[in-house]
């Protein structure tokens, strides 16, 4: 399954899943800088994967040319940020 691609520190990476298994980073052994880099790569990969998951024509048709869609996405992002901070 193709998950996406990302760039980090001047290098391009192709991200895919070879097996249906889960892996993780040893957070106890990770430096603050290492964790920030890991979080950035994960975020970019997930954002790219999700940005391709919808039907572009349907999204454009729904969004139209007004500001309602922009306002809805902004409200969702603010609410989600609050939820993440509470965890």
Image (spheres, helix red, strand yellow):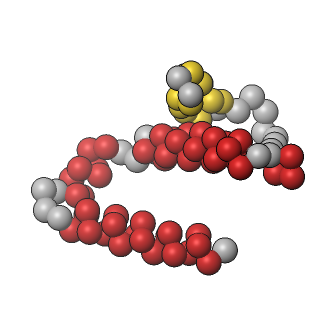
Instruction: Check the picture and name the quadrant holding the C terminus.
Output: bottom right
Q: Evaluate whether residue 80 shows in this view.
A: yes
Q: Evaluate whether residue 46 shows in this view.
A: no
In the image: residue 22, left or right of residue 51: right
Closer to us: 18 or 10: 10
Which residue is found at the position 56% from the left and 30% from the top? 8
Residue at the outermost left position: 65
Q: How many marks?
A: 0
Relative to 48, is 68 above or below?
below
In the image: residue 74, left or right of residue 7: left
Which residue is found at the position 71% from the left and 49% from the top? 32
Q: Position of residue 72 (x, y in %)?
A: 31, 69
Which residue is found at the position 36% from the left and 45% from the top? 55
Instruction: Check the picture and name the quadrant holding the N terminus.
Output: top right
In the image: residue 23, left or right of residue 60: right
Residue at the outermost top position: 11
Q: Position of residue 24 (x, y in %)?
A: 80, 45
Closer to us: 76 or 38: 38
Relative to 34, is 6 above or below?
above
Q: Position of residue 54 (x, y in %)?
A: 40, 47
Q: Quadrant of residue 11?
A: top right
Which residue is found at the position 34% from the left and 64% from the top? 73
Closer to us: 64 or 26: 26
Q: Position of residue 13 (x, y in %)?
A: 59, 24
């Amino acid at each position: 399954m193709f998950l996406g691609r990302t760039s980090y520190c001047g290098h391009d990476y192709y991200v895919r899943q070879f097996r249906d298994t889960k892996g993780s980073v040893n957070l106890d052994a990770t430096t603050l800088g290492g964790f920030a880099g890991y979080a950035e790569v994960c975020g970019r990969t997930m954002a790219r994967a999700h940005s391709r998951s919808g039907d572009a024509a349907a999204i454009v048709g729904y969004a139209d040319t007004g500001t309602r869609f922009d306002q809805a996405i902004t409200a969702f992002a603010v609410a989600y940020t609050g939820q993440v901070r509470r965890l």
